[in-house]
């Protein structure tokens, strides 16, 4: 991205949640040039000029009975997941994490020192795993569920944004998809998830080192993290560049055991595409740009790097059927407020 440019908002993909975000952004004035805002709303992070390298800044909220349930996780895992959501946003712009702030709201009957300390340990451990530290936060009483809000800050000398894909670019994803969604499916059905699926949900890994390595190849044009599912987040990546995307059904890296846990391949694929909570990375790359690097990536990080589709002219996200029967449209990934109109 050129120095001195300012983008106040980025086109988002489809979904009721993102319709509401579009409505919110419509009420915000553009930042003044002297405000030192390089990237405003719409990407995974805001990017601010602050003397020296720019800083990436983000915030992510975790709400009880929406993002987690205390019956599913211990308090350290709850803190880890909450911190990872914000740290993953830093990964999505290839930033170097520096600090997080943790704000916690909870009902008085649940506000035991032991529980608060355990949540804090989990949040701090997730931050420490990528070289950041907890530098503060806030604590308040809530009349409703537990709410954890985590802000994360990181250095971003060369942020990789959602905008900049071109028709013909390859789409790649890190890791394996659908395991966190399979864990939620199991809990909601009254059964226990496989341990690998439970861990994927309880202890997701912010792909900070992976993002910075990929950005260092020079082949990556755009980047997003997979918090809302591959279909939805690919939609954001494509929309930011005013393009469409086609995903290859046969190439989607569904995690082991997900299809069996979901009741069949079709349902396992649906979890990989739309359940969210994977916190892997999706990136658009110049054609052929990572073909030779994929094996080195896997050897270095112990997870696969898979080409799953391409950027195309148009808009929306299509799925190319594995049996050669054609393509179908995808509605998007997880949305807190339904499908919407976007």
Image: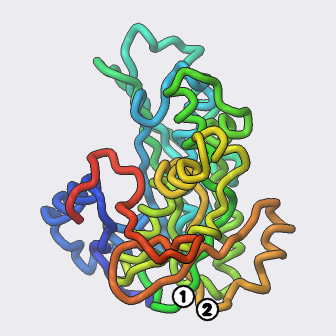
The alpha-carbon separation of the residues under discs 1 and 2 comes to 5 Å
Quadrant for residue 260, please give it: top right
Q: Position of residue 226 (x, y in %)?
A: 52, 58
> Would you say residue 322 is visible in this rendering?
yes
Q: Which residue occupies 34% across, 85% down?
A: 314
Q: Position of residue 275 (x, y in %)?
A: 49, 48
Q: Which residue occupies 62% across, 65% down?
A: 252
Q: Which residue occupies 64% across, 25% down?
A: 192
Of all residues, the one furthest to the top in this rendering is: 109
| Residue 302 in the image: above or below residue 321 | above
Q: How is the image coloured?
A: rainbow
Across the whole image, how many numbered discs are drawn on residues?
2
The earlier-in-sequence mark between 1 and 2 is 1
User: Toward the viewer: 266 or 142?
Assistant: 266
* Residue wearing tag 2: 287
* Residue wearing tag 1: 169
Left or right of 169: which side holds 254? right
User: Toward the viewer: 268 or 335?
Assistant: 268
Numbered tag placed on residue 321 in the rendering: none
User: Toward the viewer: 209 or 31?
Assistant: 209
Quadrant for residue 233, please give it: bottom left
| Residue 221 in the image: above or below residue 317 | below
Q: Which residue occupies 60% across, 23% down?
A: 191
| Residue 232 in the image: above or below residue 76 | below
- Asked whether the beta carbons under mark 1 and mark 2 sit within 8 Å of each other, the answer is yes
Q: Secondary structure at mark 2?
A: loop
> Would you say residue 89 is visible in this rendering?
no
Left or right of 213: which side holds 284? left
Q: Position of residue 196 (x, y in %)?
A: 73, 39
Left or right of 273: which side holds 31? left
């Amino acid at each position: 991205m050129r120095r001195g440019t300012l983008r106040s908002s980025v086109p988002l993909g489809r979904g009721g949640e993102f319709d509401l975000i579009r409505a919110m952004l419509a009420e915000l004035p553009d930042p003044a040039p002297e405000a030192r805002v390089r990237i405003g709303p719409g990407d995974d992070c805001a990017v601010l000029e602050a003397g020296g390298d720019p800083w990436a800044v983000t915030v992510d909220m975790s709400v009880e009975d929406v993002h987690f349930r205390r019956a599913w996780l211990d308090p350290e895992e709850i803190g880890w997941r909450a911190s990872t959501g914000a740290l993953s946003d830093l990964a999505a712009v290839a930033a170097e994490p520096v600090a997080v702030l943790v704000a916690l709201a909870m009902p008085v009957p649940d506000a035991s020192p032991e529980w608060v300390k355990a949540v804090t340990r989990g949040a701090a451990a997730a931050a420490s795993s990528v070289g950041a530290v907890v530098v503060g936060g806030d604590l308040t009483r809530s009349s409703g569920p537990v709410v954890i809000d985590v802000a994360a800050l990181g250095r971003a000398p060369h942020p990789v944004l959602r905008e900049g894909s071109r028709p013909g670019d390859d789409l790649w994803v890190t890791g394996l998809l659908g395991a966190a969604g399979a864990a939620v499916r199991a809990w909601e059905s009254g059964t226990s998830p496989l341990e690998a699926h439970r861990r994927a949900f309880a202890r997701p890994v912010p792909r900070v080192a992976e993002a910075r390595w990929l950005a260092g190849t020079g082949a990556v044009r755009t980047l997003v993290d997979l918090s809302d599912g591959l279909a939805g987040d690919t939609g954001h990546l494509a929309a930011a560049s005013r393009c469409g995307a086609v995903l290859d059904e046969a190439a989607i890296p569904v995690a082991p055991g997900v299809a069996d846990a979901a009741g069949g391949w079709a349902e396992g694929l649906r979890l990989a595409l739309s359940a969210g909570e994977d916190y892997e990375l999706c990136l658009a790359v110049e054609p052929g740009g990572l073909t030779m690097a994929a094996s080195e990536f896997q050897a270095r990080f112990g997870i696969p790097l898979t080409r799953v589709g391409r950027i195309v002219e148009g808009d929306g996200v299509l799925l190319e059927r594995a049996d050669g029967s054609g393509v179908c449209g995808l509605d998007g990934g997880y949305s807190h407020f339904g499908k919407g109109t976007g």
